[in-house]
Image (cartoon, rainbow, N blue to C red):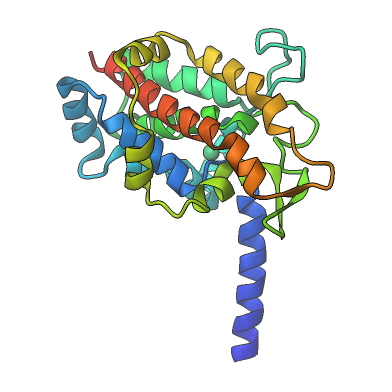
Amino acid sequence: MNKLLTLISIFALGFTSTANEALRWGQIGHRTTGHVAEQYLTDKAAAEVERVLGNESLAEVSTWMDEVRSDDAYDFMAPWHYVTIPEGETYETVEKAEGGDIIWALEKVVKELKEGNLTQKQEEENLKILVHLVGDLHQPLHVGNGTDRGGNDVKLQWFWSNSNLHRVWDSEMIDDKQLSYTELSDFVNHPTEEQINEWQSTSIRDWAYESQDLLPQVYDFPEDKELSYEYSYKNWNTVEQRLVKAGVRMAGLINEIYE
Ligand SMILES: [Zn+2]
């Protein structure tokens, strides 16, 4: 029986790691963006968020879209976490994915929330989708170039363990700092008024192009593909900046919806 359980858990672990291989900031990254956003909501928007989410914070719901990956009923959302824009192309020129993509999904849920003809459940789900996808869109590798599944196929060593480029950006660099999401929020959350205004004045598509523009830096790693201190040192400021921008912009969208 014990052997069987071990086998089952090995299988389950293997399965989970394969499923998780796809496409997300880790939990700490997502929660950081939600926690930062909470601090920039207008009073009106904060009250509306509380009406919709009850006791759950934006940080708490930020990982909902990854949790429902385990539920077949939400399979249709799987392609919404990312977009593919080959080098030299733009979202406008590229052939759109059939099941939608992150830009399409974000624009759709924002439009529906603004129109306001949603049931309580739809409004709740749309808000959770918004929170998650604003975070994902700021992780540069969620705007893939179409060659390697957003860096998932770039196998490499992270501190002498097997990993891949996508995972390094989703979670490994962040987890290695050994900070909670509230600590990380405190570290990154110092934008100036000017930055807040500038960041919030840009569009969802601009955020995707910023991620695309960061890809040369993301792919700039040693030929032996052994990444550790130096890669983290070179990229940490970018990670922090993407997290705080995501949070400030998330709040901007929510404020706009409930103004
Ligand atoms: Zn995601």
Residue drawn at (57%, 43%), measured in percent from left and top? 170
Seen from the viewer's position, the closer of residues 56 and 77 is 56
Q: Between 216 and 52, which is closer to the camera in this rendering?
A: 216
The C terminus, quarter of image: top left
Residue at 33%, 27% (x, y): give it. Answer: 190
Residue 210 image position (x, y, % from top left)? 58, 18
The correct choice, above or below, for 3 with respect to 164 in the image is: below
Q: Quadrant of the N terminus?
A: bottom right
| Picture coordinates of residue 131, whole percent (x, y) | 40, 32
Residue closest to the far bottom: 1
- x, y (%) of residue 32? 39, 40
- Residue reaching furthest right? 223
Would you say residue 68 is visible in this rendering? yes
Most foreground residue, 65 or 232:
232
Q: Is residue 199 left or right of residue 140?
A: left
Please state if 150 lies on the left or on the right of 127 as rendered: right
